[in-house]
Every structure is written in C-alpha cells, then in structure tokens.
C-alpha cells in the first residue's frame, strides 16, 4: 500500500503548517534517531537497530513538515487478527496539533478488518488520550515484558 496525504493544514500557535502523511518509508536512520531523541526515548540511542526495526515492521506511517520528520506510528501484526501499535510519537514542538490523532486514525483504518488493535498506554493522561480516540482498557490485564536495556 502506498498512501500519501498531502493537504492537511495544521495550526500550531500562530503558524499554519502543511503536514504530509505517508506510509512510504522514505526517512533516513538519522531522521528516525532525531525524532526518537526529541521525546527522550531509549530507542533513539540505538539508531541502527531502530532503523532496521522500522524498516522490517508491517506498517509505518510518518508525518512530515516539509523535509522534517515530525511524527511516526508503527505496528506489528499477524496478518489477519491482531496488530500491535508499538510506537506513536510526535516531536514536542508539534504535539497538540492533531498529528498523533491523525497517525492513529490511519492505523485504525489500516487495521479496520482485524479483530484486535492493541497499544500500551504508559500513564493516566495517555489512557485518557487513547480512550478519546476509541481505545479501551482490557479488564485488569497487565502488560508484561523482558526489558534488555
């Protein structure tokens, strides 16, 4: 699937930006690294591995302000029933402009025929954010992981 949405003006403060959304993986390792480091995510400290992971996952949507990568969402799926949104991030100076919501909207559309679309909300404000966008908690389940920093 090749998707490009070029006509999305976004208001940020007094500035009107044209944000382009695409599923083309035309970002560089350095652009991914800078985006992840802008939100202080550990993955940004491993740019080669991060880039490889993003190139190999099933779905990636990106948001661009001109030539600047300003947002990204990716998912891993089983091809039929379940997909997991692993990353959703937006540069801090672009947060609050609807970019993350648009990236999630694209993911929801991409996986609309799947039985499950999962993500992890790491704190109460994120839980509220994702609930506003149609996600819901699954009972009292806990996210489990083996973390090899």
Image: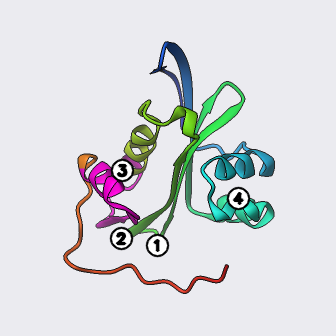
Vertical relation: 79 (above or below) 30:
below
- In this figure, which residue is indicated by the disc labeled 1? 78
**Mark 1 in CB contact with mark 2 (< 8 angstroms):** yes
Residue 52 point in image, percent of width and height: 74, 64
Does residue 144 sit above or below 3 in this rendering?
A: below
Quickly name the residue at label 3.
108
Say whether disc 4 or disc 1 marks the residue closer to the N-terminus.
4
The residue depicted at 58 percent of the width and 82 percent of the height is 147
* Left-right relation of 23 to 96: right
Q: CA distance from mark 4 to mark 1?
A: 26 Å
* Residue 63 badge: none
Mark in front: 1 vs 3: 3
Say which residue appears at 46% left-offset and 43% top-offset. 103
Q: Quadrant of the C terminus?
A: bottom right
Classify mark 1: helix, strand or loop.
Answer: loop
The residue carrying mark 4 is: 44
Q: Determine whether label 3 and label 2 are within 8 Å by CB.
A: no
Secondary element at image label 3 = helix
| Mark 4 neighbour class, 10 Å CA radius: few under 14, some 14 to 19, many 20 or more | many
Mark earlier in primary sequence (3, 4): 4
How many marks can you see? 4
Mark 1 or mark 3, earlier in chain: 1
Relative vertical location of residue 137 with respect to residue 98 in this rendering, above or below: below
Pointers 4 and 1 in contact (CB under 8 A)? no
Of mark 4 and mark 2, the one earlier in the sequence is 4
Stretch in magenta = 109-131
Residue marked by disc 2: 81
Q: Residue at x 31, y 67 (%)?
A: 116
Q: Depth check: 149 or 58 in front?
A: 149
């Amino acid at each position: 699937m090749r998707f490009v949405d070029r006509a999305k003006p976004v208001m940020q403060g007094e500035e009107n930006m044209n944000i382009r959304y695409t599923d083309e993986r035309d970002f560089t390792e350095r652009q991914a690294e800078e985006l992840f480091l802008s939100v202080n995510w550990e993955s940004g400290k491993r740019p080669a591995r991060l880039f490889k992971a993003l190139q190999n996952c099933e779905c990636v949507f990106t948001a661009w302000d001109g030539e600047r990568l300003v947002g990204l969402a990716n998912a891993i799926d089983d091809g039929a029933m379940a997909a997991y949104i692993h990353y959703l991030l937006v540069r801090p100076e672009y947060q609050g402009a609807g970019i993350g919501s648009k990236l999630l909207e694209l993911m929801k559309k991409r996986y609309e025929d799947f039985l499950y679309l999962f993500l992890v909300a790491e704190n109460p404000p994120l839980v509220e954010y994702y609930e506003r966008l149609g996600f819901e908690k699954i009972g009292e389940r806990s996210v489990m992981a083996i973390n090899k920093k």
